[in-house]
Image (spheres, coloured by chain):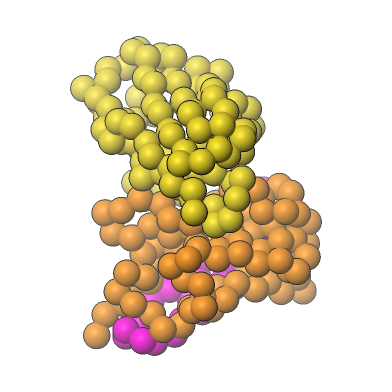
Amino acid sequence: EVQLVESGGGLVQPGGSLRLSCTISGFTFSSSAMHWVRQAPGKGLEYVSAISGDGGSTYYANSVKGRFTISRDASKNTLYLQMGSLRGEDMAVYYCASSTSSWPLTMDVWGQGTTVTVSS
Amino acid sequence: ETVLTQSPATLSASPGERATLSCRASQSVSSKLAWYQHKPGQAPRLLIFGASTRATGIPARISGSGSGTEFTLTISSLQSEDFAVYYCQQYDNWPYTFGQGTKLEIK
């Protein structure tokens, strides 16, 4: 069974940093592009970032470019999102998702999400 | 950045009725358009990719159409499990973007 499990969410002060993790099982991690998507309270889905299956290509929404870094560790079957210079508008449920292809296309399988709260 | 505009924002319908949701792109995205269903407290679910191809396990009552800048998601006969928020998403150009969502609610 394909499973994605996010972790690392929590309370962080404005300007602070946090690293999210997404551990996958049930499919070949290195063959799958991965994504991060978020949903702020009362808002819709917002695309955050993507990384190709080999980790060689990364992409970011304009709202997080320069502050967030996506990466992956094939030896641990884990996807990461390093978030820095956090702002109130970054507060959201963060979902990781996988593509069936090595190039980021659609988000075929999703995790249940981890919550990030930005507050002093 | 490609802006996706969904309409209506909220659609009220009864079980058994037909529902039609629209998504308009600010520039052509070819057929690289997906639809997702999202229920509160759950993970989003891929319904349609390539504008019209159903994802694995998606029932035939759910269909997608369109290309370029105009897209439609149709649910032919609403079931209780269909009431949710629906998002379109383009994957033609970076950054990928979502529409703002259409809430399909029970009348």
Which corner quadrant of the image does residue A13 belong to?
bottom left
Q: Is residue A14 above or below residue A9?
A: below
The structure residue drawn at horizontal position 55% and vertical position 66%, both measured from the top left corner, is A60
Q: Residue furthest front?
A: B27
Q: Residue furthest left?
A: B107
Q: Colour of chain A?
A: orange
Q: Is residue B49 in view?
A: no
- Asked whether residue A98 is in view, the answer is yes
In the displayed structure, A85 sits above or below A43; it is below
| Residue at 37%, 14% in the rendered image | B18
Residue A6 against residue B92 in the figure, above or below: below
How many numbered marks does the figure carry?
A: 0
Query: Picture coordinates of residue B17 (x, y %)?
Result: 33, 13
Q: Quadrant of residue B9?
A: top left
In reply to whether residue A23 is colored magenta, the answer given is yes
Chain displayed in yellow: B
The answer to whether B13 appears left or right of A18 in the picture is: left
Q: Position of residue B84 (x, y in %)?
A: 35, 35
The answer to whether residue B14 is above or below residue B38 is: above
- Segment tinted magenta in the rendering: A1-25
Q: Is residue A6 left or right of residue B84?
A: right
Give the quadrant of the C terminus of chain A: bottom left
Q: Main secondary structure of the magenta part?
A: strand
Looking at the picture, how far across and down is residue B19, in whole percent? 37, 19
Asked if residue B24 lies in the magenta stretch, the reply is no
- The residue nearer to you, when weighing B95 against A72, is B95
Of residues A61 and A54, the one nearer the viewer is: A61
Q: Answer left or right for B12 relative to B98.
A: left
The residue sitting at 50% across, 63% down in the picture is A61
Residue that appears at 43% across and 34% down: B24
The percent coordinates of residue B85 (x first, y second) are 36, 38
